[in-house]
Amino acid sequence: MKRINVLVFVAIFNLTVAQNIKQEKKAIKNVVAQFSQSIIKKDSATFHSLFHTDTVNWIGIIRPRSQNKLQEIDPKNTKNYFHDTYRSFFKYIMTKEEKKELFENVQIINDDVVASVIFDYTFWSDKKMKNYGKELWQLIKTDGQWKITSVIFSYELAEFCNK
């Protein structure tokens, strides 16, 4: 009898954990959607609210094909990455051109307090694709909200490549 009670308890516990993880995934998908919509709407308040208040890594790395083309233009251009902030990225979003970032193949790995999100993205300005690549976010859940703590992405410059 005790063994059956333990098995029932374990089954209920596992079901509860699985449901909680599913709910957290839904909340994380909402962060992804808000990120995209805040770019389109140029909504700085929403965009900034998605990030943790402490330092957030924001690193882009140029894919080899685009890096080679950039070096043909300027042989001194040997650095294949840049470090920025989400705040300066949003200042760029606020320029007059229409901007949007589209996400495909979104994958989320999470428990109830940490998460990784990886996806393919395309970034558009004035209805022209500017760059594309893979993007990886790290998130934590603090004060009941999912916050982005790290954004790392590769990018291929569309002007040099056919996708």
Image (cartoon, rainbow, N blue to C red):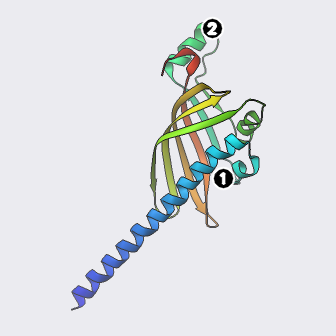
User: On the image, numbered disc 2 is attached to which residue?
Assistant: 73
User: How far apart, in angstroms, are the residues tagged by discs 2 and 1?
Assistant: 37 Å
Q: State the SS at label 1.
A: loop
Number of disc labels? 2
Residue 1: x and y, percent? 21, 92
Front disc: 2 or 1: 1
Residue 125: x and y, percent? 66, 28
Question: In this rendering, would 49 be left or right of 4?
Answer: right
Whether 76 is drawn above or below 12: the answer is above
| Image point (42%, 69%), residue name | 19
Q: Residue furthest front?
A: 127
Whether 41 is drawn above or below 9: the answer is above
Looking at the picture, which amino acid does disc 2 mark? Ile
Which label belongs to residue 40? none
| Image point (58%, 23%), residue name | 80
Mark 1 nearby-residue class (10 Å; few <14, some 14–19, many ≥20): some
Whether 41 is drawn above or below 126: the answer is below
User: On the image, numbered disc 1 is attached to which residue?
Assistant: 50
The answer to which of 33 and 63 lies nearer the viewer is 33
Given contact means CB atoms under 8 Å apart, are the residues at marks 2 and 1 in contact?
A: no
Q: Residue furthest bottom?
A: 1
| Image point (54%, 56%), residue name | 28
Residue 73: x and y, percent? 63, 8
Looking at the picture, which amino acid does disc 1 mark? Leu
| Image point (75%, 46%), residue name | 44
The answer to which of 142 and 97 lies nearer the viewer is 97
